[in-house]
Image (spheres, coloured by chain):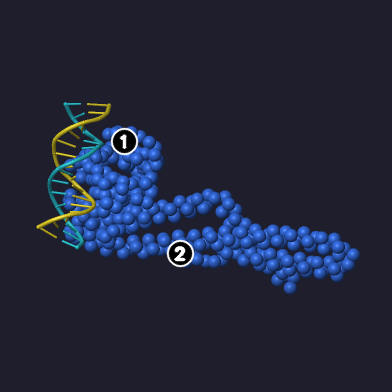
Chain colours: A blue, B cyan, C yellow
Amino acid sequence: MDNFADTSLTIDLNRVATSYVNEERTKTELAKEYDGQSRISMQNEQDIFINELNKMRVENKKLTEMLLAVYENCIALRRDMTEMMQKCPQDHHHEHCSPSSKRKRDDEACGCTLINIENAECANCQNSPTTPKEMKSNISKVYCKADPSDMSLVVKDGYQWRKYGQKVTRDNPSPRAYYKCSFAPICPVKKKVQRSTVDKTILVVTYEGQHEHNNPSGDNKVTTYQGHQSPMNSKETPNASPNIINQSNNKQRQQGSVEEDEATGLQKLLVAQMASSLTRNPSFTSALATAISEKIFTHELEDERSCEI
DNA sequence: CGCTTTTGACCTGCGC
DNA sequence: GCGCAGGTCAAAAGCG
Ligand SMILES: [Zn+2]
């Protein structure tokens, strides 16, 4: 992890320019010694080189600033990730397996991040029986990117759901929708869908329990976003797909952690997005390539100099 | 007609 | 015990 802090990326670009100057001066002096008559032409050549060097210095300075900015961002992201990593193990104490403090537990997801959508239960809680009450211990949280223009709370996950309630909660102006599996009471699975307070285009879906039947449409795995669709579609045609981050819940967070969970999930999402956008950004990659090539060039110059000596 | 959604009322747990 | 907030119920309405 700490290799991110390695400042070796901040190449000493000034040294590159200085070595140019030194080398040029040496050349000029040699030229004076060997051919005094060509002094004027050499002087012109030197001016040209100096101009180029100045340009390079400016460019190098820009690059240095860019690299510094990237480095600072990297440090900040690393710090966030470290904090998230530290939170996760602490959340696995799992006092929630005891039957107290019901409501608090229900909304609270532990910080562990899972990639798969299914079975987002905590490994430490898997031995608990799945009676209807204890089914609540099997809670997973999924963040789904939804169409910003679509304000319905419909999430595509392949199962059929029956909406049985909607509430406006205190900490979020967006209403929370309550769904039961259409196979209820055979299948006691429930889900809650609410827009994120941080980003209203993100739906926070909390699943409670596991389906005790096959997926009717067979596509409960990650699916691609399919855009707008009628909210009245009784077959749960999707507006959003749970393809981003899943937080398994084994509950038991300190109070007021719902927003933290949400923020943590979003942070991870942002980290992934920033990483991918950085690697796709041609200016970033070219700047990085330039910096690396400069570094290599500096190395070669040093080698040459040491050979000359 | 059967199923789903809507929505106000009701229930329940928690904090004070 | 009371008030608040989240969760659930169930009657009414909508839809195919
Ligand atoms: Zn089900």
Residue in the picture at 22% in, 52% down: A136
Snapshot quadrant of residue A45: bottom right
Chain of the residue on which disc 1 is drawn: A
Q: Is residue A166 above or below residue A28?
A: above
Establish whether labels 2 and 1 are both on one chain.
Answer: yes
* Type of amino acid at the residue the image marks with label 2: Met
Residue in the picture at 26% in, 49% down: A169
Question: Dot 2: what SS?
Answer: loop
* Type of amino acid at the residue the image marks with label 1: Pro
Q: Which residue is mark 2?
A: A1
Q: Residue furthest right?
A: A37
- Residue A56 lies, in percent from the top left, at 68, 59
Residue in the picture at 69% in, 67% down: A18
Asked whether mark 2 lies closer than 8 Å to ligand 1, one says no
- Residue A272 lies, in percent from the top left, at 44, 53
Q: Which residue is mark 1?
A: A231
Tell me if A239 is positioned left or right of A186 in this view. right
Looking at the image, do the residues carrying marks 2 and 1 touch, with CB atoms under 8 Å apart? no
- Residue A256 lies, in percent from the top left, at 28, 58
Chain of the residue on which disc 2 is drawn: A
Q: Quadrant of the image for the C terminus of chain A?
A: bottom right
Snapshot quadrant of residue A226: top left
Residue in the picture at 37% in, 39% down: A150
Q: Mark 2 or mark 1: which is in front?
A: 1
Q: Is residue A131 above or below residue C9?
A: below
Q: Quadrant of the image for the N terminus of chain A?
A: bottom left
Q: Is residue A184 above or below residue A247?
A: above
Whole-number angstrom distance, CA of label 2 to CA of label 1: 45 Å
Numbered mark located on residue A260 in the image:
none
Question: Dot 1: what SS?
Answer: loop
The one of A276 and A196 positioned closer to us in this rendering: A196
Crowd class of label 2 (few under 14; some 14 to 19; many from 20; radius 10 Å): few
